[in-house]
Image (cartoon, helix red, strand yellow):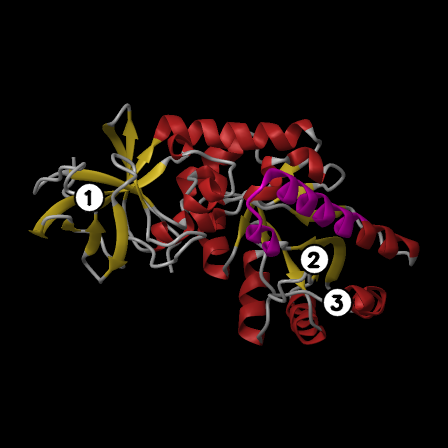
């Protein structure tokens, strides 16, 4: 086994997570287009497709380029293309793979239209709708007017509507999450209906996060879900009640390297290994072996543990597994993920699309 700290991936649990999520969606007639920003790996993206995904979702042009060159054909780049050079690169990539993207501004649409028209290509696009997080998307009251303007651009073909309902992550109970998932689907279906009423043939409705897709029946009616984090799981999923620690496939393996005084210990995993993201509760991760040990602070190469020495014994050299607060950050911090089969090293997975 490698020296600590390193990223460990339980292959058996990963397969359960992938097949479980894809099956939930398939039962509701929803295609799975998992977000590969979680793992950034061609190998894992291909495994998700092998398990039933119809395509993948990417967050960056680089991710999409790596995946297309790795042999994956159906790609949704869930990020608006803005800038002449970026749009030109996107259009060149469209010669290699069946790639589509989202639009939420006239400027971006015009630049993408010009790049596509210059290459005699038609790019399939989704109109992005702001669900309320104000990250991207047009406002609902502008939908028809915006769509009719976009429709006039050559080289673009409006095939769907898209939203990211990130506000769902404020909820931690099943009724709240179910209600939010249903509202997300209702918004997409309403937008599709309104655009069809003005003569725009909407074929695709794209939404879905790990939280909403866990209750896939609430999303029934949309065509595709972009759930991504489900593949690894993390403390966000645990706090939301959809995963337990046993469902989390990815951990950071770390060693206890110092015990300055009783109840205080240091591990060799800091911000350069773990994300500094904090989750719904205080702390920087969950210690699998002893949940009552708290990871209270991170430096670059140090993790600070606090525990009750009367009830918990730690020794220098002890190996601990940490479930991160946000697993999607981890593959961007490492160049190797150690895939384990029954806790034995099986092979190394490379996050090909880092940065």
To which residue does mark 3 refer?
139
Q: In which quarter of the image is residue 104?
A: bottom right
Q: Quadrant of residue 15?
A: top left
To which residue does mark 1 refer?
308
To which residue does mark 2 refer?
125
Residue 180 is a magenta residue: yes
Q: Is residue 55 visible?
A: no
Dot 1: what SS?
loop
Q: In this view, does 333 lie above or below 115?
A: above
Q: Of callouts 3 and 1, which one flags the residue occurring earlier in the amino acid sequence?
A: 3
Say whether residue 330 is left or right of residue 15: left
As measured in the structure, the alpha-carbon distance from the residue carrying label 3 to the one carrying label 1 is 52 Å
Dot 2: what SS?
strand
Say whether residue 206 is left or right of residue 333: right
**Residue at 35% across / 50% down in the picture?**
331
**Residue at 62% across / 43% down in the picture?**
177
Q: Which range of residues does the magenta coloring cover?
A: 166-189
Could you say where residue 77 lies in the image, as x and y percent from the top left? 57, 55
Name the residue furthest front. 310
Q: Do the residues labelled 2 and 3 touch (CB within 8 Å)?
A: no
Q: In which quarter of the image is residue 140?
A: bottom right
Q: Is residue 231 above or below residue 327?
A: above
Say whether residue 248 is left or right of residue 310: right
As measured in the structure, the alpha-carbon distance from the residue carrying label 2 to the one carrying label 1 is 56 Å
Q: Which of marks 2 and 3 is in front?
A: 3
Q: Nearer the viewer, mark 3 or mark 1?
A: 1
């Amino acid at each position: 086994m490698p020296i600590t700290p390193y990223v460990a991936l339980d292959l058996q649990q990963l397969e359960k997570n992938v097949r479980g999520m894809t099956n939930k969606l398939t039962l509701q007639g929803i295609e799975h287009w998992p977000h590969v920003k979680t793992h950034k790996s061609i190998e894992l993206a291909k495994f998700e497709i092998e398990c039933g995904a119809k395509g993948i979702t990417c967050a960056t042009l680089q991710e999409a380029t790596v995946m297309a060159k790795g042999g994956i054909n159906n790609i949704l780049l869930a990020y608006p293309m803005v800038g002449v050079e970026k749009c030109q690169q996107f259009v060149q990539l469209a010669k290699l793979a069946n790639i589509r993207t989202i639009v939420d501004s006239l400027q971006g649409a015009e630049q993408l239209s010009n790049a596509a028209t210059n290459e005699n290509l038609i790019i399939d696009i989704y109109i992005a709708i702001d669900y309320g997080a104000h990250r991207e998307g047009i406002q609902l009251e502008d939908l028809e007017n915006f769509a009719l303007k976009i429709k006039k651009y050559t080289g673009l073909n409006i095939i769907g509507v898209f939203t990211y309902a990130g506000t769902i992550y404020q909820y931690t109970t099943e009724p709240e999450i179910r209600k939010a998932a249903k509202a997300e689907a209702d918004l997409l279906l309403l937008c599709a209906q309104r655009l069809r009423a003005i003569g725009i043939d909407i074929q695709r409705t794209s939404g879905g996060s790990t939280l909403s897709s866990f209750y896939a029946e609430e999303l029934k009616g949309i065509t595709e879900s972009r759930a991504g984090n489900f593949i690894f799981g993390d403390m966000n999923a645990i706090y939301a009640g959809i995963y337990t620690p046993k469902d989390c496939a990815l951990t950071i393996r770390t060693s206890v390297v110092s015990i300055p005084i009783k109840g205080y210990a240091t591990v060799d995993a800091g911000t350069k290994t773990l994300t500094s993201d904090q989750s719904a509760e205080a702390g920087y991760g969950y210690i699998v072996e002893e949940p009552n040990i708290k990871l209270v602070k991170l430096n670059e190469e140090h993790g600070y543990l606090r525990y009750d020495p009367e009830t918990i014994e730690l020794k220098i050299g002890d190996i601990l597994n940490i479930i991160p607060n946000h697993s999607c950050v981890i593959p961007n911090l490492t160049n190797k993920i150690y895939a384990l089969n029954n806790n034995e090293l099986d092979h190394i997975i490379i996050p090909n699309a880092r940065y």
